[in-house]
Amino acid sequence: MSSRELILGRVRRALADVQPDDTPYEQAVPRGYLREHGDLSVEETVELLAENLADYRAIVHRTDTAGLAGTIAGLLAAHGSSTVLVPPGLPQEWLAATETARVADRVESTPDELDQVDSVITACALAIAETGTIVLDGSPDQGRRRITLVPDHHICVVRVPDQVVSSVPQALERLDPTRPLTWISGPSATSDIELDRVEGVHGPRTLEVVLVAPSVD
Amino acid sequence: MSGTFVGMPAFPKAAHEAVHNTTLRGNLRHATHTIRGKRAKAVMEMSDWAELRDAGKRIKDHTLRHLDRYLVQLEESVTAAGGTVHWAADADEANRIVTYLVKATGESEVVKVKSMATQEIGLNEALEAEDIHAYETDLAELIVQLGKDRPSHILVPAIHRNRGEIRDIFAREMSEWGRPAPEGLTDSPAELAEAARLHLREKFLRAKVGVSGANFMVADTGTLVVVESEGNGRMCLTLPETLISVVGIEKIVPTWQDLEVFLQTLPRSSTAERMNPYTSTWTGTTDSETADGPSTFHLVLIDNGRTDTLADEVGRQALRCIRCSACLNVCPVYERAGGHAYGSVYPGPIGAILSPQLRGTASEIDASLPYASSLCGACYEVCPVAIDIPEVLVHLRERVAQGGPATEKGNKVVLKPAKGHAAERAAMRAARWALSHPGALRTGQRLASRTRRLHPRTLPGPGKAWSASRDLPAVPAEPFRDWWQRTNGGRTNGGKQEGTK
């Protein structure tokens, strides 16, 4: 007998007390919990996102579409970056104001090559206000997971308010499980020394989130 | 300190030694009290915590009650997404499978994400025996591995170490394993984290094989979820060419939507954060054109005592555990005894009910674990999936003391009463007789009162062990029933007891 059959057989014998008419999944789980916490306006939800991002030591910047290229150029300059990783589908105009050398996100790149790059800039799939989380799903404007992992400086652009949801349940509804997802809440951190939080371990030690609103004109 | 749990003494002996270690007690007290306060605050933010807790419990219960169906569904989903599923009935088989898979890649080292399942099966030791080096990459696991130590906490395996001890371990040991610790390393947590970053980076960048566990597996999509803080998880899950995930069969949830419950309750319960810094989800492998992450993915599903646990209708709730460790942080026994005394990778209250079920109650340590509790119930209060740990502890005490039906390696067995409990059973039989014979009880109580000055502080003979950690109750000068009769229930004679000072 294979171990598969062995284990499944053990499971079935262990569950001899479960009747065939046991409550089905749809009725077994009460979903009385909230879809979102509080009744915030769109502006307040964006404000909450900014607050919670900052609370976990992400650096938050606010601008509009017209100011975005300038903001990004400023961040790269302030960080002293001479190279920046760029996913293939990143809108060209975001980098219109910077001279920083672009490095493409290529399948052939080795981890060591990525380790030589100063910064990475991406869009995101969505952001969650209640938890201060940005989620990447590997779309062309976000690139492979590793490009936002190996470089030490990550700039992530969130289009507000369109890409902002209030809660974790709302986020999961909008995400595609078949894509590799990375949920990011602040820069990498650890609580492993005396259960006290310290920022900056293996992931990017600096996370800058740019909240970009449509220009009013 | 040896790196193994084999041959551990019973809990009372190990705990007795641990409570005399003042550094350990200080470290644990500091850490558990810090996290307790933070957790309470993080939970308070959620007005629907009770509903989330109930939903989490129901999702897990439902899944366990139909585990065969969900396992088959998961296997189909993972396979359809490009992964390969392996089944391991016990630790040895799981280790053999992983060793084989690593050897098939031609590599002789792997990087590991912190995983309870691989600790449980002793994977690192099994790989080492085949000349494959497994590098732990979680900071606390690194501290444990470099210190040739054992984990003492589910979430923070090095919780028993303070910053000074960690500095010393890094300064002494890092050079043996790779890049040495920086010159002049101090005990500031930021510097220690930086030292770990530098030490591990070269290992991440050259790694070809990653080994992980998973916090959740979604049956309907085949998605695996790893929740972490440092980014070492992301490194192991995305940089290597081959990923091997070793996961207990109870880690399944039926649907993608179910994650909306646990991704709210787990971070707040474990690190007391609204959300942990990084959560990775992946479903099989990606197409070669858009390749992102490992091109080969193996999922090793392990039983190793879980189906035996599932067979116990009271004990099976332990399989709901999502390994948050909130129960450890609130436990007065854990805080004083520390994690090593539990003799298992699962310490604390959840360990006290999980280890004796996964491993059986035959060994001295496992038979003693259900007693490693004062039954105060704090663990049940904080559990995000509402595991009634005191209920299971009492149930397992009964199994140890009285014996009875249980399941071992899938076979129904009848356990004999444990040896050490003969005196307890004799005492209980005597008590049953005395309590059902009021005349004898009265005579005995009066006799006890009159001879109270002669009573020893500890029990002799077989009762010695019991009174080693407990004070015998003081016998009153007059039995309660005599007092009640004499004073008409306290209404006459001032209700005072004769002989009280």
Image (cartoon, rainbow, N blue to C red):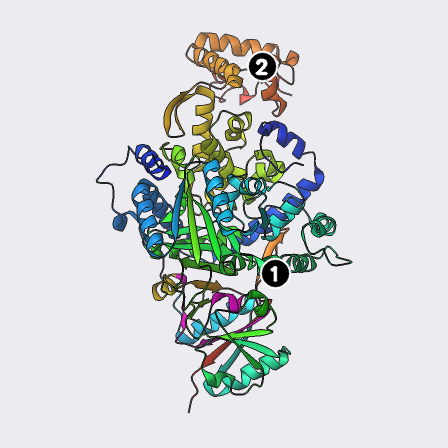
Q: Which kind of residue does numbered mark 2 sit on? A: Pro
The magenta region covers A142-168
The residue under the point 57% across, 81% down is A101
Residue B43 visible here: no
Q: Is residue B126 above or below residue B487?
A: below
**Residue at image mark 2:** B462
Q: Which kind of residue does numbered mark 1 sit on? A: Val
Q: Is residue A24 above or below residue B499?
A: below
Outermost residue toward the bottom in this view: A217
**Is B351 colored magenta in this rendering?**
no
Q: CA distance from mark 1 to mark 2?
A: 54 Å
Residue sitting nearer the eye, B10 or B237: B237
**Residue at image mark 1:** A201
The residue under the point 52% across, 25% down is B363
Residue sitting nearer the eye, A138 or B226: A138
Q: Is residue A40 above or below residue B217?
A: below
